[in-house]
Amino acid sequence: MQEKVQKKEKVFAYIDGFNLYFGMREAGFDNCRWLNIHNLVSSLLKPHQTLVCIKYFTSRVRNNPDKQKRQSTYLDALESTGINITYGNYQDGSTECYRCGHTWPTAKEKMTDVNIATAIIIDAYKDEYDMAMLISGDGDLTPPIREVHNLFKNKRVFIAFPPKRHNSSMALVAKGSETIGRKKLVDAQFDDEVISKTGYKLKIPNEWK
C-alpha cells in the first residue's frame, strides 16, 4: 500500500530589521550583526515546512556616514541571498530633558510595523503562505496577527522573538512562538566576505567583528 505523501507547509518569513538588530545589541550579541537572515530562518523551520519567501523590513539610516556605509554593506549582503527588502522612513527628531531643558537629536523609524502588517494580510489573502513566520517583538503587530487568524482559518502566524524582545500580547494571539537564542544567531553568520548580486566583494565591517 502506497504511503500518503504529506504536503509541505508553505512558509513566508517577515523580518522586523531594527527590532531584531536592537534586540541583539541589548542582549550583548554584538558579534552577531553580520547575520545571514536566510540561514537563520532556515534553521527555524520544521521538516514538514518549506521556505518560499523572506521579506525584510527596515529603514535607511541618515546623518551618520559610517552607520550608513555599514548598513548599505549589510543590506547588499542580504540581497545576495534573494531576500526582498521593504523600506520605511527614518525621521529626524529631538528629545528634551524636562529637568534641565537640554535637547539632543534623535531618530525614529516609521512605517515598518504598518508595512509588515499590510504584507502579512495581503499575502494571506493571495494564499501565498500556510504559515507566516514573524521575527519581531513589536506589540503593534498584535492586531494584524489576530485578524489573519480570524479571517483565514487555515493559516497561522508563528513568532520568533528576537533576544530581549518577547511580547506577551503577541504570544497570546500567535499560533506558536519561540525566542531566538544566541547559538542560532552565531551559527547563521555570513562568511567574512560575501559576493553581492552585482559581483562586488562585501566585507564584514570591522566594528562588527
Image (tube, rainbow, N blue to C red):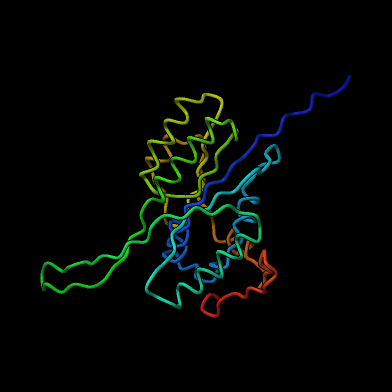
Residue occupying image coordinates x 47% and y 29%? 149
Spot the residue most to the front.
Answer: 198
Q: How many marks?
A: 0
Q: Nearer the viewer, residue 19 or 162?
A: 19
Q: Residue 58 appears at what percent x and percent y? A: 46, 57
Residue occupying image coordinates x 67% and y 74%? 201
Spot the residue most to the top.
Answer: 1
Q: Residue 185 appears at what percent x and percent y? A: 58, 61
* Above or below for 194 versus 90: below
Horizontal side of 37 relative to 103 (left or right) equals: right
* Above or below for 74 versus 121: below
Q: Residue 39 appears at what percent x and percent y? A: 65, 56
Placement of the C terminus among the 4 image quadrants: bottom right
Q: Quadrant of residue 12?
A: top right
Q: Residue 121 appears at what percent x and percent y? A: 48, 35
* Above or below for 159 versus 97: above
Q: Nearer the viewer, residue 115 or 20?
A: 115
Q: Nearer the viewer, residue 160 or 110?
A: 110
Horizontal side of 113 relative to 179 (left or right) equals: left
Residue occupying image coordinates x 26% and y 65%? 93
Q: Nearer the viewer, residue 113 or 44?
A: 113
Spot the residue most to the bottom.
Answer: 206
Placement of the N terminus among the 4 image quadrants: top right
